[in-house]
Amino acid sequence: QVQLVESGGGLVQPGGSLRLSCAASGSIFAIYTMGWYRQAPGKQRELVALITNYNSTNYADSVTGRFTISRDNAKNTVYLQMNSPKPEDTAVYYCYADVRDPRMSRRDYWGQGTQVTVSS
């Protein structure tokens, strides 16, 4: 089994900054794509940003230029640097990872979610 544990959520003022972290642990042979999704109240879960194991990145249009995704493969950790957040960025942020275990099974994993609230 693999666990994804997020940290760094909380209350941030518009125009401020916040960094989310997500560490993967457990039976890991390899981690491919990692990323972040979010879900606001009454809305569907949506992609925020993805990063491959080759450090290729993909962002939602709504966060491009404000958020930066990165990863530390030695720590099995993915980060989301949120700069100049807006109230519409308020949501529960979920970490995602595409993982292959030592028995060569491959599947998607999700974190438990961390609340980000952007408000003055």
Image: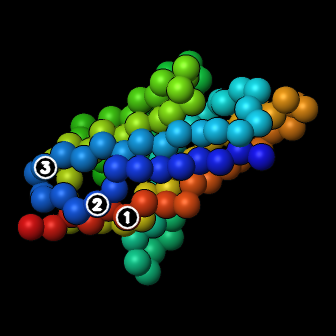
Within 10 angstroms of label 1, few (less than 14), some, or many (20 or more) residues?
some
Q: Position of residue 67 (x, y in %)?
A: 29, 41
Q: What colour scheme was applied to this rendering of the protein?
A: rainbow
Q: Position of residue 77 (x, y in %)?
A: 51, 33
**For the residue marked with disc 2, what is the amino acid?**
Gly
Residue nearest the observer in this picture, 7 or 105: 7
Answer above or below: position of 83 versus 74.
below
The label on residue 115 is 1
Residue nearest the observer in this picture, 23 or 35: 23
The label on residue 103 is none
Q: Which residue is mark 2?
A: 10
Counting residues from the start of the chain, the first of labels 1 and 3 encountered is 3
Q: Which residue is mark 3?
A: 16
> Gap in Å between the C-alphas at discs 2 and 3?
12 Å
Quadrant containing the C terminus is: bottom left
Counting residues from the start of the chain, the first of labels 2 and 1 encountered is 2
**For the residue marked with disc 3, what is the amino acid?**
Gly
Q: For the residue labelled by badge 2, is the local secondary structure a helix, a strand or a loop?
A: strand
Classify residue 27 by image quadrant.
top right
Q: Residue at x 37, y 64 (%)?
A: 115
Total label count?
Answer: 3
Mark 2 or mark 3: which is in front?
A: 2
Res. 61 visible in picture:
no
Classify residue 24 by image quadrant.
top right
Within 10 angstroms of label 3, few (less than 14), some, or many (20 or more) residues?
few
